[in-house]
Amino acid sequence: MRTLGPKAAAGADAPQIAQEAVAVWVRMDAALSPVIGKRGVAALYKRSLHMTCPAFPWLTMAYDGAIEPGDFASLLSALEQQTAGDAAVAHDAALQAFHDMLVNLIGASLTERLLQAAWTPPSRGHAAQDPS
């Protein structure tokens, strides 16, 4: 699982952390929706926020704003209003809760296979060509 704590420690600001966090959730939504449906992903996302809110009460804004499946605008807004470190730690905690729930539902191996693409941002530029 790819966390954002190191990115914050390296000097990223809160808006950068928020953008990266939302990108991870969008990629997870895309990877999991064909398997558990948009509403299934949304339910796990909201539950992960609910489980994380006691440690980060300001995430209630993201929880309350998560009305439509696949809409992470309220998460973006909540994270942007924090320090980079707080945003990264809260995102990482919600992501861990989501991951743990998914492992309990479908198993570790399938979870890792489904989410592998979500952990790595898409590459930029041209893909390397096979010289053969």
Image: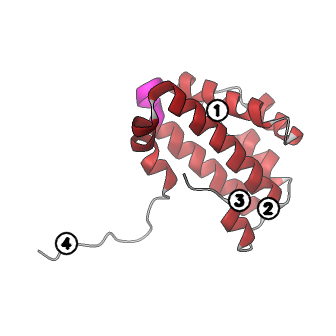
Q: Which mark is residue 45?
A: 1
Say if mark 2 contacts mark 1, CB within 8 Å: no
Label 3 amino acid? Ile
Mark 4: secondary structure: loop
User: In the image, what residue type sits under mark 1?
Assistant: Tyr
Give the labeled residue for mark 4.
130
Residue 70 visible in image: no
Residue position marked by numbered label 2 in the rendering: 84
The correct choice, above or below, for 29 with respect to 117 in the image is: above
User: Dot 3: within a 10 Å radius of its alpha carbon, few (fewer than 14), some, or many (20 or more) residues?
Assistant: many
Distance Cα–Cα, label 2 vs label 3: 6 Å
Residue 102 at x, y = what percent?
Answer: 53, 31
Above/below status of 77 relative to 57: below
How packed mark 1 is, by other alpha carbons closer than 10 Å (few <14, some 14-19, many 20 or more), is: many
| Helix, strand or loop for disc 3 | helix
Circles 3, 1 touching at the beta carbon (< 8 Å): no
Quick check: 27 left or right of 64? left
Q: Amino acid at mark 2?
A: Ala
